[in-house]
Amino acid sequence: MTAFLKALKYSRRDDLPDCIDIVLAEAPLLGTRDLLVILKYLDKGPVAVNSKLMRETLVRLVPDREESIMGWFSQPFYDEGKAEGKAEGKAEGKAEGKVEGEAEMLGHLLEKRFGVVPAVVREQIVTADVASIRAWVERVLDAPDLQSVFDAN
């Protein structure tokens, strides 16, 4: 859970590229799925991290998984750029990807904090807007139970 919290903490900082080693310090301890979620979340965030820097960091931290992670990490951008081609399509795709990344991160945080997340809650998350997801992310750390994350009060 610490790795997810670090990703949340640093993802909006202007110095994210300088702190990438701190953010990914626990990469060797994470499963590939969790690491990919964090990388996707960081990639969709407001502060850009150079893919070369990300690759170099992953080579140092998880050399045995670097190729598969970076292949997964870069393929969607290649496919998106090739298929869409239009500036407005790219902006729309980027916004959609950002929502998906934040929703996925919230799901993982909820799982780590409260255990199995019911399908109805996962559906609520994936159909929510960015503002709602961000509000829920803010509440997940202090909420005494799963339902409290989604209560407006």
Image (cartoon, grey):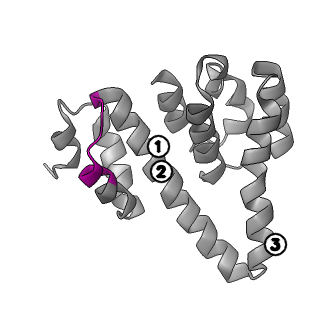
Is 68 in the magenta?
Answer: no
The residue carrying mark 3 is 82
Q: Give the image location of residue 94, x and y in percent.
A: 62, 66
Of the pair 50 and 32, the residue shown nearer to us: 32
Q: Residue at (26%, 44%) from the top-left corner?
A: 118
Q: Where is residue 13 shown, x and y percent of the image? A: 59, 41
Disc 3 vs disc 1: which is toward the camera? 3
- Kindly identify the residue that appears in the image at 72 percent across and 58 percent down: 76
Q: Residue furthest left?
A: 153
Mark linked to residue 92: none
Residue 102 is tagged as 2
Q: In the rendered structure, which amino acid carries the disc numbered 1?
A: Met
Which span of residues is magenta-colored?
114-122
For mark 1, give the secondary structure.
helix
Q: Where does residue 108 sit, x and y in percent of width and height? A: 42, 37
How would you rate the neighbour count of disc 2 (Cα within 10 Å): few for under 14, some for 14-19, many for 20 or more? many
